[in-house]
Image (cartoon, grey):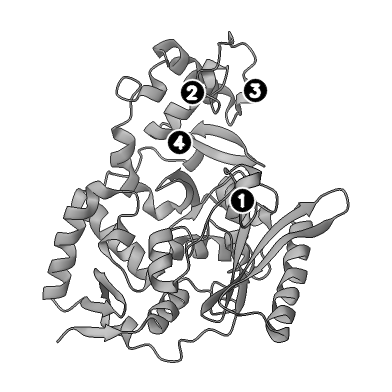
Amino acid sequence: MMIKINKEKAKNIWIRSQKLDQKTPFGKGLEAVSKAISHLGYVQIDTINVIERAHHHILYNRIPDYQSKYLHLAQSQEKTIFEYWTHALSYLPIDAYKYFVGKMNKYDNSSDGWFSSVTEADYKKVKSILKSDGPISIRDIKDDLLVEKTHAWGSSKPSNKALQLGFFKGDFVIAERDGMLKKYDLTGKHFDWKTKPKMATEAECCNYMLERSLKSQGIISIESICYLEPKMKQAIGQLIEEKVKLNELLEIKVEQIEKERFYVKPETLDQKNLRSKRTHILSPFDPLIIQRKRLKNIFDYEHLFEAYIPKEKRKLGYFSLPVLHQNNIIALLDLKTDRTKNKLMIQNWIWLNKSKSNSNTQTIENELDKFEKFQLKTR
């Protein structure tokens, strides 16, 4: 008989798996950063900075004493994390490096249109500089013959694309960041590797993706595992079938979500006292929010990201943040930090699902006080 659970239990399992129901799920300080990223699988990097950037915001919600310098130290000195592309540019635990070597090996300037303008001379030049001088940023290369930009996100320096290509190939690594300014180094030199980790097999990569999702999502689907990686769906589906036959995974139904098949570990389904009592102002790039279809299905909430919509067409605001209270999203806050006055400004406050009450207002205001202190402390 197919096991059925209601949406409330599905939400609570997901929140528990995201570690948003505990005060210090990863402890405190620098060590907590690597533990958090390892558990979540990745932390997405984003450049928007009307408030503190998304990668810091995501960690703040899971590490109570979080400071942006902890992430910098984990990347540049502890070297327990690295940057690479998942569904977007993200911080990843160093133990996961081998699962991305296959992607790195597929990159070259002839097969990718974005890097087709990178010449062998450009590439040798930056590699030589990194060998002798690294880590360096693009600002440190001053002898480029500037070219006309071909894209708004591009650069007039040919060396910039050469550095990016080396990053995607795995020859170079982002050794540290100063704000959003990246400093590159040779990968082996940065990590003190004689040889890079051996490329994981396809089967190992599938198992990694499955286990990463089970750990951070609790209840999974093929869609949620293969978010923006549709080529992996068939192999992941076969692996799940094997796990179900071995009773390592259970196939379940979530009420009112008839078209999607979900899977869970038996011990995850048996958890008790799941309902969270905590409140969080979440980034739109938080792992709980970023998969919009999954969020809508399980939370009955569809998040609209309006940063790239013309101002006159926005309904919520430039950078609206969902407020998670207990196990529901009850409000949206469009916030902005006024750096001249050192104040957190509320541009818009929208209540959802008739959640407005004196108690909820006070709860959110208390969180806003903490969030403002975080904004000012990390700048």
Tell me the distance, in whole angstroms, between the alpha carbons under discs 2 and 4.
17 Å
Under mark 1, the amino acid is Arg
Q: Amino acid at mark 2?
A: Lys
Amino acid at dot 4: Thr
Where residue 181 appears, x then y in whole percent?
Answer: 63, 35
Report the mark closest to the observer, 2 or 3.
2
Write down the residue under mark 1. 314
Q: Earlier in the sequence, mark 2 or mark 1?
A: 2
Spatial CA span between label 2 and label 3: 14 Å
Q: In what element is the residue under mark 1?
A: loop
Q: Which residue is mark 2?
A: 161
Q: Residue furthest front?
A: 312
Depth-wise, is mark 2 or mark 1 nearer the camera? Answer: 1
Closer to the eye: label 2 or 4: 2
Residue at 14% in and 60% down = 238
Q: CA distance from mark 1 to mark 3?
A: 40 Å
Element class at badge 2? helix
Kindly identify which numbered label has been placed on residue 140.
3
Vertical order, 376 against 241 (above or below): above
The residue to which callout 4 is attached is 187
